[in-house]
Image (cartoon, grey):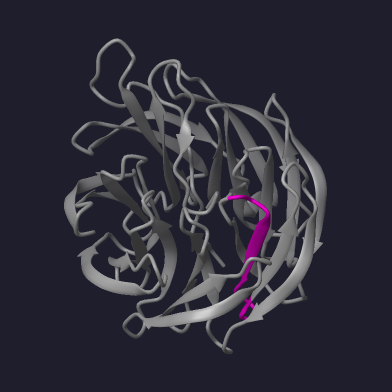
Amino acid sequence: MLAAALLVTVTPAQATASSAGSARKTLVYIVNYNHNTLVGYAEHTDGSLRRCARVRTLAGPEAVAIVGTRLVLTADSGANAIGSYGIRAATGALYPISNAREAPGSSPFSISVTPGGHFAYVANSGNATVSAYRITAGGQLIPAGRAQEPRGASPYHVTFNPGGQFAYVANFGNDTIGIYRRTPGHAALTRLGVYHEPAGDGPYDLATGPDGHYLYVADFRSNILLVLKIQQNGLLSIRDRVAEPFDHHPDSLVIDPSGRYLFVANTSANDITAFRIQQATGRLARVGRVPTGGYPFSLTLDEAARFVYAVSFGSSTINGYRLDRHTGLLTPLGTTHEPGAAGPYGIAAVTLPGRTGAARPVSKKTR
């Protein structure tokens, strides 16, 4: 089964028309499942995209994550492997560094990087594990243990609270969310418990806001968005269930940096729903919808929360939208086409605040 991909962060390459290298620069990266490629785009000030990088991956890339300004990681389910690619800061170009192999049949579905950027966690849907890797300064991935979910759990995504001390695993196969404690600076995950959803929900993607008070869940099969309160001990309790229309199949979530808006890609409806987040309660209020291409599988937005982008697997397109930060409404800007039936799966953006500044990853679930 294919997956909604995770976030990418990228270093800049002439992303905006600016002077003297002091302006903030944003790039957008996508992975193409059918073409086995990782492609970079520079974001212009009007939200349009210009291709600036392309490299081949192993096989069937479904997810991406970026580590600072240094490298891009890809989860290649077709090769049961994780790829590491270095970033050339001056241009945004990429070069291969190494590959880490997962077990045969593991089908790595997504990859997430901790808030500090020192560890990566891979959700393996094929053998119900979450593999941990330590990321070296040179971009190598050093195996650092794994957590075992119940057989048949099919973990799809891992996300963390902003402090990184709690990890949550969306188990699509058995309708649960695994809850783990993690000591910052260490890779090991210690199980705290499990949150049981109603049978048939199908938790697919997870997102937390910048305050870390609530966990949002896209339940693919039941067309539900779940709002869960994150307790001080990391455990979860229900706050709200919000229904999307029947057969819309929500599969990807992203929250803007202010924590005020949640955007949801509805795979079967070919659209994005925008919600306003009530800060005191975490509850959601729907503010609008916009169309996408066919089968939108992943969303991202830039650090300044100016633009939202969606990749659509069925139409091999990237759709851009201008975000009204006062209302949460999205205005379509245009469409960028990938060649042939490329099958784009994952997308994300990172903004560099000037030539010498450090990149700030924009996270869906850091993907």
Q: Quadrant of residue 161?
A: bottom right
Which residue is farthest right? 145
Q: Which residue does the image show at 62% across and 39% down from the upper left? A: 116
Which residue is farthest bottom? 199
Left-right relation of 237 to 35: right
**Viewer-side residue, 139 vs 193:** 193
Task: Provide the residue span drawn in magenta.
Answer: 163-176
**Viewer-side residue, 105 vs 93:** 93
Give the position of the N terminus as an image quadrant: bottom right
Give above or below for 51 relative to 59. Answer: above
Give above or below for 264 relative to 335. Answer: below
Left-right relation of 275 to 346: left
Q: Is residue 151 magenta?
A: no
Give above or below for 221 relative to 360. Answer: below
Question: Residue 189 at x, y = what percent?
Answer: 77, 57
Left-right relation of 154 to 276: right
Q: Which residue does the image show at 58% across and 89% down from the upper left? A: 199
Q: Quadrant of residue 193?
A: bottom right
Left-right relation of 264 to 149: left
Question: Residue 207 at x, y = what percent?
Answer: 49, 61
**Viewer-side residue, 115 vs 281:** 281
Q: Which residue does the image show at 44% across and 81% down from the upper left? A: 240
**Viewer-side residue, 206 vs 48:** 206
Q: Which residue does the image show at 23% across and 21% down from the upper left? A: 17
Q: Is residue 172 magenta?
A: yes
Residue 174 visible in this rendered orientation of the protein: no
Number of numbered callouts drawn: 0
Question: Residue 66 at x, y = what percent?
Answer: 54, 38
Residue 156 visible in this rendered orientation of the protein: yes
Question: Residue 141 at x, y = what percent?
Answer: 73, 37
